[in-house]
Image (tube, rainbow, N blue to C red):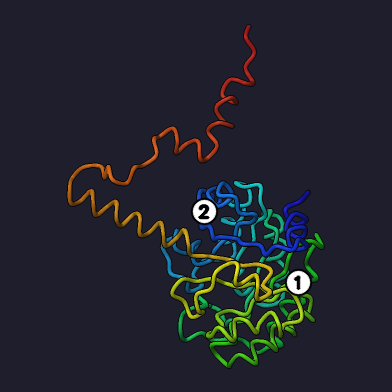
Amino acid sequence: MTPQARLRALLRAPEMIAAPGAQDALTAKLVEQAGFPAVYMTGAGTAAVAGFPDFGLLSATEMVANAARLAGAVGVPVIADADTGYGNELNCFRAVHDYERAGVAGIHIEDQLFPKRCGHLDRKEIVPREDWLAKLRAAAAARRDPDFLLIARTDARAVVGFEEAIARANAALEAGADMAFVEAPETMEELAAVPKRVAGPCLLNIVHRGRTPAVSLPDAAAMGYRLAIIPALLLMAGIAACDAALAALRTTGAYPAALAPLSVGEAFARVGAGEWEPRRTAFRRDP
């Protein structure tokens, strides 16, 4: 079963899919090892590990390369951030081909003006509705695998209001998208209204201390969302843990014993040492 087919099968099941965010192959493996059915490649995290804020500073080539590393590291489907599609309809067409070759199961394409901003920051700008729909039509036509999931993300709520965001989401589904992603509803009422007013499956972006009210995964599922991504969970946890470890080292001058770190062997085991070690001698033939 391909990653694309596995993701479609998950979407046909009654349970909502929860896909924590991963910014690299290591965090993708951690998500899989924790038992989650899918991984979300966070664009903000991908930018962060390259040393940049989520301001659209990475190229399509860099984003696809990271997606390929994540998809190659895990057996569960990977859903990737494809920003604005990196240009016009032609660029979107190529982006779909590139992400498919990378092995991801689906992508989302948004309606922000490029260079984009994180969906939970102020001063976002969006393109005219028809410009975005044209890119989605191109993306839908570009799919070689019909199971490749095309998610339409609209950032219209913060720019022109909730009604336009809902209208864009429904228009995107009519244009060939498989799922709608209304970014950053601002009240619990809006959050609950999205799956009711959008004529198709919906994605929820859970961002701690973002513009959207806090909601649990069970509550999101009860509202009718089919997929929830938690993009920054591991990125923020990692930054906080690194800050704490470095502060302890700087203060005490000793390895922070309170962190109870893994041994070297345990850490290597998390990234597949048990699979790779037998290969060291498996192909040798004694004379």
Q: Position of residue 49 (x, y in %)?
A: 44, 58
Q: Earlier in the sequence, mark 2 or mark 1?
A: 2
Disc 1 target residue: 178
| Vertical position of residue 34 compared to residue 235: above or below | above
Q: Mark on residue 42?
A: none
Left or right, 108 with reference to 12: left
Q: Position of residue 231 (x, y in %)?
A: 53, 65
Going by the numbered disc 2, the residue's amino acid type is Asp
**Toward the viewer: 17 or 189?**
189
Q: What element does badge 2 sit on? A: loop
Going by the numbered disc 1, the residue's amino acid type is Asp
Disc 2 target residue: 24
| Snapshot quadrant of residue 173 | bottom right
Q: Say few, some or many: other residues with alpha carbon within 10 Å of mark 1 (under 14 / 14 to 19 / 20 or more).
A: some
Residue ID at (54%, 63%) = 42
Q: Position of residue 186 (x, y in %)?
A: 53, 85
